[in-house]
Amino acid sequence: MRTDNAAYIERDLAHVWHPCTQMKDHEQVPLIPIRRGQGVWLEDFDGKRYLDANSSWWVNLFGHANARINAAVSAQLEQLEQVILAGCTHEPVIRLSEALTGVAPAGLTRCFYADNGSSAVEVAVKMSFHYWRNVGRSAKRRFITLSNSYHGETLGALAVGNVALYKSIYQPLLMDVITVPSPDCYEREPGQTWAQHSRAQFEHMQAALDRHSEQTAAVIVEPLVQCAGGMRMYDPVYLQLLRAACDRHQVHLIADEIAVGFGRTGTLFACEQAGIRPDLLCLSKGLTAGYLPLSAVLTTEALYAAFYDEYTKLTAFLHSHSFTGNPLACAAALACLDIFRTDAVLERNRMLSAHLGARARALAAHPHVAEVRQHGMIVAAELVRNKASREPYPWQERRGLAIYRHALSRGVLLRPVGDVVYFMPPYVITPEEIDLMVEVAREGIELATCD
Ligand SMILES: *Cc1c(COP(=O)(O)O)cnc(C)c1O
C-alpha cells in the first residue's frame, strides 16, 4: 500500500468531513497528512516539515512529542485510562484540582470538568443561570456578551458568541443575548491609547448593566484577546471596570480563558493583568498543553454552596459528559503545570515575545498592513485594502488563504483568520524559528497584496 501524501489524501477525502472547512476547497488546496510531530515541527508523509505557527489550533504549549508529557500520559495509561467521575474519583483529577485552584486567581476553589472548550462554556452558562434560581432570583436568566466575541460552537456557546460567520446561519436555534460593543482597540481613534479606548468603550457595558442587571445572570468575556474574532485586543482596565460593575449589579463574570489561559498573554491567566477574579473561569486548549481534550470550569465557594443541599431540594448541578475528568487528560494537564512550575516558562516567554514582537512590528511598514498588535505570545497583523481608511479587502478575495498557501510551500503552517495573519507558536520555539515564521509571513503578505 502507498504511504505518500497523495495516498492519504485520497483515502481521507473519501470519508473524512473536516471541521470548519468548505470541503470543496480541497479540490484546490491540498490537505496535509501529518505523520508525526516533534517540538514545533510537523512532518508530512512525503517528509516535508512545517513549523506549527498556530500551535495546532492554539492548544499546544510545549511542542509535539514532549518527553515529560509523553512520560506522564504513558505512566497514567498503565494505571487507569478512564472511570466514571460521578460516584468515583481518581488521583489525577484530585491532584489537578488541587493544582488548578493553587495557581488560579485566589478564591476559585471548585473545579468542574468537561472535555472541550464549548462544553466548558455551556457549563459556566448553565451554572450561572442555575445559581440565580437556587438563590431565588430566577428572573436573572440573560447573558451579556461582547461584539466579535467567540465562545465555541455548541448552541449555548454559539449564542453567547458573536462572530457572524459562525453564528448567523444558526440564529433561529439560539437563545437571545444582550450584545455590547467590544473594547477592541483596533477601533480606537488615532492618538488614543488602548487604555483610553477600552475605558471609553466600557460606557456601553455600564449602560447595559444599568438597564438589564435584574434580568442578567452573567457577563461573559474573553479576557484581553478576542482570538477567533481576528486576534482583536484590549486593555486590562476594561476587566477591572467590568469586575467592579458586576459586583455592584450582582451579576456573575465569566472569564473564557480557553484560548488566552496558560501563559498566552504573558501571565499564566490573562485576568491576572487586571488583578481580578472572575466568578467562573473556563479553561481548555492549553490546559493539557494541547495533548488531550479536557476542560475545566473553576468557581467560588459561594457559587458552589448555592447548589449544596438535600437531594430532594433538586438544587444539584446535574450536568455531565461521558469523559468528564478523564485520567489521561488530567495526567497531561498535571505534567503541563509541572513544566510551568519547574521551567521558568513565563520568564522565557517574555524574551520570546519581545523578539517576536520586534520582528513582527516590521510588518506594520507594509502598505497593506493596518496594524500589528500584541499581547504576550499572541501577535497579529491586520491586512487591509486601504491603509489610510482601513477599508478591508472584500472577504470573497480570501487574501489570507493566499498567505496560508505560500507559507505551506515554505514549510510554515500559518492559518490566518480571514485577513488577519497571526503568530501563536508553541513556547518551545527558538528565536531563529521566530525569524523564519515572520519572514515567511512577510513574503506571503507581499504576494497576497501585490495586485
Ligand atoms: C476555542 C475556543 C472555545 C471553544 O473550545 P472548543 O474546544 O473548540 O470547543 C471557546 N472559547 C474560546 C475563547 C476559544 O478560543
Image: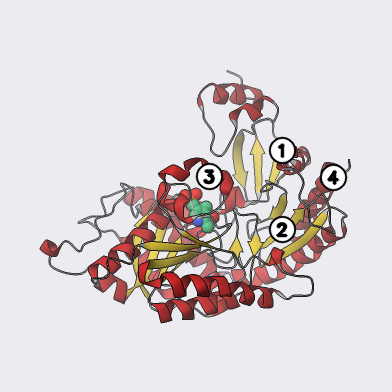
Q: Determine whether 48 is above or below 358 in the image.
A: above
Marks 3 and 2: which is nearer the front?
3
Q: Determine whether 404 is above or below 277 in the image.
A: above
The disc, 4 or 1, on the residue closer to the chain's N-terminal end is 1
Residue ID for mark 4? 449
Marks 2 and 4: which is nearer the front?
4
Q: Which residue shows up at 57% across the image and 48% down it? A: 164
Distance between the alpha carbons at the discs numbered 2 and 4? 17 Å
Distance between the alpha carbons at the discs numbered 3 and 2? 25 Å
The amino acid at mark 4 is: Thr
Contact check, label 3 and label 1, Cβ < 8 Å:
no
Asked if disc 1 is less than 8 Å from ligand 1, the answer is no
Where is residue 88, by image quadrant? bottom left
Contact check, label 3 and label 2, Cβ < 8 Å:
no
Residue ID for mark 3? 168
Residue ID for mark 2? 380
Q: Position of residue 356 (x, y in %)?
A: 75, 63
The amino acid at mark 1 is: Gln
- The image's mark for residue 244 is none
The disc, 3 or 2, on the residue closer to the chain's N-terminal end is 3
Q: Determine whether 82 is above or below 355 in the image.
A: above
Where is residue 369, by image quadrant? bottom right
The amino acid at mark 3 is: Ser
Distance between the alpha carbons at the discs numbered 3 and 1? 17 Å
